[in-house]
Image (spheres, coloured by chain):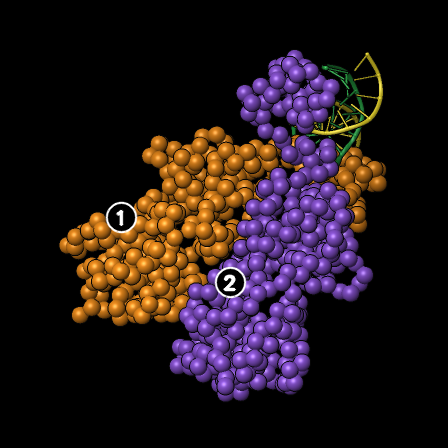
Chain colours: A purple, B orange, C green, D yellow
Amino acid sequence: MITIKEMADIIGVSPTTVSNVIHGRVKETSKEMIEKVNKVIEEYNYIPNMSARTLSQNSSRIIGVVLKYQLIKGKNIMQDPFNSEILGSIEKNISEAGYYMMFYSSGKADDVLHLTATWNVDGLIVIGAHAKDCQKIVKHTNKPVIFIDCYFYNDGIEYVNIGLDDKKCAYKMTQYLIEEGHKNIAFLADNCIGVDEERFRGYAEGLQENGLLFKERNYINLDSDLIPLKDNLKQIYRRRKEFTALFCASDYYAMEVVNYLMDNKINVPDDISVVGFDDNILGSNMRPRLTTIRQNPTLKGKIAVKCLMRLIRKQPLKKKNIRLSGQLIIRDTVRKIE
Amino acid sequence: MITIKEMADIIGVSPTTVSNVIHGRVKETSKEMIEKVNKVIEEYNYIPNMSARTLSQNSSRIIGVVLKYQLIKGKNIMQDPFNSEILGSIEKNISEAGYYMMFYSSGKADDVLHLTATWNVDGLIVIGAHAKDCQKIVKHTNKPVIFIDCYFYNDGIEYVNIGLDDKKCAYKMTQYLIEEGHKNIAFLADNCIGVDEERFRGYAEGLQENGLLFKERNYINLDSDLIPLKDNLKQIYRRRKEFTALFCASDYYAMEVVNYLMDNKINVPDDISVVGFDDNILGSNMRPRLTTIRQNPTLKGKIAVKCLMRLIRKQPLKKKNIRLSGQLIIRDTVRKIE
DNA sequence: TTGAAAGCGCTAACAA
DNA sequence: TTGTTAGCGCTTTCAA
């Protein structure tokens, strides 16, 4: 590993000159000098030492990417195709922008702040964190932070969040089900905060605006980690006559439900209609194909990095609350009721 | 951000003393001193600056994790549940060991070497790289490297690789198919190097040892990225009478094949048997459930980090070529032929 | 057009 | 038991 100083010695020049050439500050440098320096850089395969640069510049070119770690129903969060796809996209865009990605899986604000400080990261992308943690992160760091799919307190802080227009999408889906003749639609989720809350609201609003009544018992909550998924599914099986359609807040659950029902001789969509939300690799590959809402994780990641880069460069952001729109994907899990 | 020097000034002591306390080098430090220092550390929430530490110690506590980026048939690599699960596991174990994970997606040796040098990483985990790149990486860095699912030249270098016993697993699967009465078994893969090659060999050996002939045309190769997957599937559909069972080198392809056939009124397993390899989230959730080989990506990640930590600490490794064993998971895609 | 020198925060050999 | 000091590699201000 050759250093600037060593190269300077080889050429018989000062480190400043070499550094200047490296950084293209060559307005006052002679052509021959530039060439000489570049030749040595090439020849010795000089690679800058980022730690040293970070120390002296107070900027590391590291982007901290934090994914809230959660085991939902025993499922490793990285098994969710949605998360992995968004991470892949973020990595790609960070690399292309000439930055480095430090990946960390934890939702705890303290951990995030620690990472930020130890490595002096230039920016942070936080995925799926809770309001409390988001608030703490923003309050205790002066680094730019982009949130993805997070939710916040109404505390006056201007969080920059890239999300989906969950409510509108859920509304759209509910509308679609009603148009297909469904009057008794249940909603299923594993929590009632954040995106799932938004989705629920879109569902409830969709019912209401179409003159349908929301019944408390049609909200099926899987939130307790104590109850195995199988038991939840069994319960849905038992209650299957109570509704004609089941709106699941994620493709993953929709798939589980459909599989369970089909395995137990209940046909989807003939006996009951089931829809999901996300359109991940699971939904499009199951049979019957899942009717769902498509969102674009790759785009989400791309926008997140783009916004972060603007913040790092102190350029203004037009919008702080970015909501991508989702697309209704009609496939084979909804039956038309005449 | 308080520094060691500032804390030393506050206490009225030298930086060395503070540093010693931080690092637990307190054999010769008075109890009161230790307490005083710890109090200030606590009070001012001191967080060490890793860049500075890296610079002076020549060790960064960063583990570079490199995933060979490849778009197989237009599929984003991170959409593969296998990759994301292994990454999740690696992250978890790196964190727990007190290290940091820098994630980078590229298989090019030069990129990897660049990353290693710029950040002075303490170790490298390389996933799915080709022999040429593996060789170059090892030759040009003196940092410990653990490979996962890589393949190598027979060049005398002692690569440390964590893999699956692909050949034996494929053999096991072939054996199973033969026991179920299949005599005409085709094999499908998208390349013929690395793990897929091993799997093919296990398949071929399985045939041979059971007195069956391997027919060249029963090796179905999807390797050209120019031909869309759909065309490959169509071809398999056309040739479906030529074999009674199709052994796919991955769950992903098995799922595509099964879906395509079922969508075209060919029943699996009644008309044709299909098996996969990996047992990812796709295989267990499709219908009919996929018969496949289960490997454990979480374990792979864990072992990789454990080995790397041993290398970093200069402890010897018992085995260089670690092959986890896979498990035959019998589900619903194989028909018994009487 | 180029160079000298200080400083970023931390560590460790050595001195006291 | 604690302190002094040089140095890790790079940047940048100011001087030449």
Which amino acid type corresponds to the residue marked 1 in the rendered image? Arg
Compare residues B57 and B129 and report the one nearer the observer. Answer: B129
Question: Is any atom of residue B95 visible in this view?
Answer: no
Residue in view at x 49 percent, y 77 percent: A334
**Circle 1 residues within 10 Å: few <14, some 14–19, many ≥20:** some
Q: Quadrant of residue A186?
A: bottom right
Q: What label sits on residue B201 in the rendered view?
A: 1
Residue B145 % position (x, y): 48, 39
Q: Position of residue B104 (x, y in %)?
A: 54, 43
Q: Residue at x 72, y 22 (%)?
A: A27
Circle 2: residue type: Asn
Image vertical order of residue A239 relative to residue B243, above or below: below
Q: Quadrant of residue A213?
A: bottom right
> Which quadrant: the N terminus of chain B?
top right
Q: Residue furthest bottom?
A: A241
Q: Can residue A44 be spotted in the picture? A: yes
Residue A204 horizontal side relative to residue A58, left or right? left
Disc 2 target residue? A280
Q: Looking at this view, is B113 or A303 the one in front? A: A303
Chain where mark 2 sits: A
